[in-house]
Image (cartoon, rainbow, N blue to C red):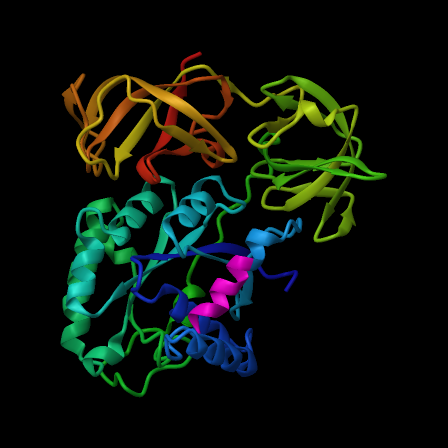
């Protein structure tokens, strides 16, 4: 495992299109989850009066429960290996979890699986304005997830009809294209998460399909270069006080590397300290680099000087702090329209803060980036725009160009994601 490249894969799609079932069954076919566990889930699912329909989904969902309860430093949710690659799977069961994991969570997704349904009515709901598949696709693209596979699920529902696949695929292609992906680079695969067709083994029920299985397609994902050469940036996820050890912040190194003895600076407070020790999965390590989820002990830093949302860097290249910044956003959801002065909650890496949209500079074409209108009065769903944003207090954030990992954000209000965006430049 250690010598295989690693990717974070996020599974997305509209509620009830079968994300969890597909991945649960996939993990069972890979041998990651044994039949006994599945049988126990089936029994538990039947006892709730839902029949055994949730037996695969619960593989994913009881992990979810575990990760809400556990405070282990191991932030991975579920792991599996393909012949070439080692994956950490981020399931996106509900909206809130999805946003948290995608934007502020432990993992930046390197690649994504979007699950659509071969049932016509379900596909139409998922990709309609307000549908989660549409929202997820927009978010994935805006947040820089460049590699995506689309699974057309529930093929068993139409007796594995090639026509049903083609119809759903056409709709899926329109969606994926409208968001800005190049269709030639996006594989579409017909599967049945419930029956197991085309997940790990080639399906006997779709003789017309000569493409890849999901497992084979996962192995075509490319591993991005790790940004090890850049300055250190580590957004703090949590801070624990451990008796006999002291202050232990936890987080994922987004760029650069660190080792015991290094001097560090914490922004926005500006406190400095030294790294005493580093550990991952309860194992001591001398050094850590971009991509590692770690806990570490600091010398010279008080627990009150560091909190979730802070970013750790080195004194010679400290993380930037923005009082105001220019961004490119895309409006995903809003009952009416956004006007300047609107103050939703900004979520970026691990920071959450109320922020005001102070000025709308231009409306742009999301696919080409060309300016369509200067100083628009308001923005509605689907609009992409250059907007100036002022958080209520200065926050550590970077331009997307320099540090994409710390340059993406979402704007949320009333329990949903209003817009997603990237930081163009820090104004002050």
Instruction: Tell me which secondary structure the magenta stretch mostly adopts.
Output: helix
Answer above or below: position of 329 versus 222.
Answer: above
Any part of residue 76 in sight: no
**Residue at coordinates 41% horizontally, 34% vertically from top-left?**
408
Q: Nearer the viewer, residue 315 or 211?
A: 315
Task: Indicate whether residue 59 is drawn in magenta.
Answer: yes
Most extreme residue toward the top is: 428
Image check: 115 left or right of 396? left
Q: Nearer the viewer, residue 224 or 120?
A: 120
**Residue at coordinates 57% horizontally, 36% vertically from top-left?**
255
The spot of residue 277 in percent (x, y) is 79, 39
Q: Nearer the viewer, residue 5 or 109?
A: 109
* Count of numbered labels shown in the rendering: 0
Task: Indicate whether residue 128 is drawn in magenta.
Answer: no
Any part of residue 352 in sight: yes
Answer above or below: position of 48 versus 317.
Answer: below
Most extreme residue toward the right is: 244
Task: Kindly indicate the quadrant of the structure image that contains residue 202.
Answer: bottom left
The spot of residue 323 in percent (x, y) is 45, 14
The spot of residue 382 in percent (x, y) is 19, 38
**Residue at coordinates 63% horizontally, 46% vertically from top-left?**
293
The spot of residue 267 in percent (x, y) is 60, 22
**Quadrant including the C terminus:** top left
- Looking at the rendering, the stretch of residues picked out in magenta corresponds to 56-65
**Quadrant including the N terminus:** bottom right
Image check: 283 left or right of 175? right
Image check: 174 left or right of 49? left
């Amino acid at each position: 495992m250690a010598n295989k490249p690693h990717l974070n894969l996020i599974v997305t799609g509209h509620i009830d299109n079968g994300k969890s079932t597909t991945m649960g069954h996939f993990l069972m076919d890979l041998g990651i989850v044994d039949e006994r566990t599945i049988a126990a889930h089936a029994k538990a699912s039947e006892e709730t009066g839902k029949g055994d329909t949730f037996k695969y989904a619960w593989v994913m969902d009881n992990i979810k429960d575990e990760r809400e309860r556990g405070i282990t430093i191991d932030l991975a949710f579920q792991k599996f290996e393909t012949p070439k690659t080692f994956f950490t799977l981020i399931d996106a069961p509900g909206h809130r979890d999805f946003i948290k994991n995608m934007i502020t969570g432990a993992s930046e997704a390197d690649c994504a699986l979007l699950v659509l349904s071969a049932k016509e009515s379900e596909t139409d709901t998922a990709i309609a304005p307000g549908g989660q598949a549409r929202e997820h696709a927009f978010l994935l693209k805006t947040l820089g997830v460049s590699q995506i596979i689309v699974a057309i699920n529930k093929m068993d529902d139409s007796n594995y009809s090639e026509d049903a696949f083609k119809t759903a695929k056409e709709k899926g292609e329109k969606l994926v294209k409208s968001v800005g992906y190049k269709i030639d680079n996006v594989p579409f695969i017909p599967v049945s998460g419930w029956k197991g067709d085309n997940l790990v083994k080639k399906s006997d029920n779709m003789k017309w399909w000569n493409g890849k299985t999901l497992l084979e397609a996962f192995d075509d994902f490319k591993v991005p270069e790790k940004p090890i050469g850049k300055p250190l940036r580590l957004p703090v996820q949590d801070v624990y006080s451990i008796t006999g050890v002291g202050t232990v912040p936890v987080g994922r190194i987004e760029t650069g590397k660190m080792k015991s003895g290094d001097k560090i600076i914490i922004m926005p407070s500006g406190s400095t300290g030294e790294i005493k020790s580093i550990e991952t999965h309860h194992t001591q390590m001398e050094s850590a680099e971009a991509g590692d989820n770690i806990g570490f002990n600091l010398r010279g830093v008080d627990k009150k000087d560091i909190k979730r949302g802070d970013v750790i860097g080195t004194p010679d290249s400290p993380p930037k702090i923005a009082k105001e910044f220019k961004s490119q956003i895309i409006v995903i959801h809003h009952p009416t329209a956004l006007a300047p002065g609107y103050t939703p909650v900004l979520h970026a890496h691990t920071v959450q803060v109320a922020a005001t949209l102070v000025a709308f500079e231009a409306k742009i074409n999301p696919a080409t980036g060309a300016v369509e209108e200067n100083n628009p009065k308001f923005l509605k769903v689907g609009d992409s725009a250059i907007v100036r944003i002022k958080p209520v207090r200065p926050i550590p954030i970077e331009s997307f160009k320099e540090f994409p990992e710390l340059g993406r954000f979402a704007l949320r209000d009333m329990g949903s994601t209003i817009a997603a965006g990237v930081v163009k430049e820090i104004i002050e």
